[in-house]
Amino acid sequence: MKTLKLVNGDLVFNDSGELEMVSDDDEIVQNLEMILSTQLGEFQLDETIGLDRSNILTKQFDEKAAHYDIVEALMQEDRVQEVRDVTFIPDKENRIMTVNVTVVKTDGTTLTVEGVPINA
């Protein structure tokens, strides 16, 4: 698939003023980043899209429950067969949890998505 390129939620234009596009693995990575960056229920057109952050952004962080929520969110992407690895990097001072994930696509290849911030 091919879609518009986004950086921090903003459309990206090239030097000629044209919208940039992403495709293939870059498009899947962008989609996974968007899923993780969207709070479950936030998108009014489809409230089933996104990540339940309640187990991630809590004072009593439960890594097992948070891992489950990440897997559940990433499985919303039809081209993901399995979530192989989830790493949490907490920044308690700024109330940000950064997540790195490795997924197995339906074609058997792997993709790594790094540094996705889960903000409070």
Image: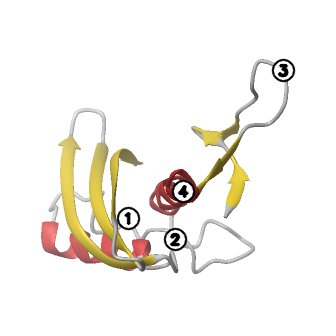
Q: Give the residue type that dot 3 points to.
A: Ser
CA distance separating discs 1 and 3 = 39 Å
42 on left or right of 17 = left
CA distance separating discs 2 and 1 = 8 Å
CA distance separating discs 3 and 2 = 36 Å
Q: Give the residue type that dot 1 points to.
A: Arg
Q: Position of residue 85 (x, y in %)?
A: 20, 65
Q: Position of residue 67 (x, y in %)?
A: 22, 70
86 to 69, vertically: above or below: above
Q: Give the residue type that dot 4 points to.
A: Met
Look at discs 1 and 3 and give the one toward the viewer.
3
Mark 1 surroundings: few (<14), some (14-19) or many (≥20) residues within 10 A: some
Query: Circle 4 is placed at which residue position?
Result: 34
Q: Which residue is drawn at the image coordinates 52% and 51% (left, top)?
A: 26
Element type at marker 4?
Answer: helix
Mark 2 surroundings: few (<14), some (14-19) or many (≥20) residues within 10 A: some
Tell me whether circle 4 and circle 1 mark residues in contact (CB < 8 Å). no
Query: Circle 2 is placed at which residue position?
Result: 40
Query: Circle 3 is placed at which residue position?
Result: 16
Tell me whether circle 3 and circle 4 mark residues in contact (CB < 8 Å). no
10 to 80, vertically: above or below: above
Q: Which residue is drawn at the image coordinates 29% and 52% (left, top)?
A: 99
CA distance separating discs 2 and 4 = 11 Å
21 on left or right of 17 = left
Q: Name the foreground residue: 60 vs 63.
A: 63
Q: Earlier in the sequence, mark 1 or mark 3?
A: 3
Q: Which mark is residue 53?
A: 1
101 to 106, vertically: above or below: above
Q: Earlier in the sequence, mark 3 or mark 4?
A: 3
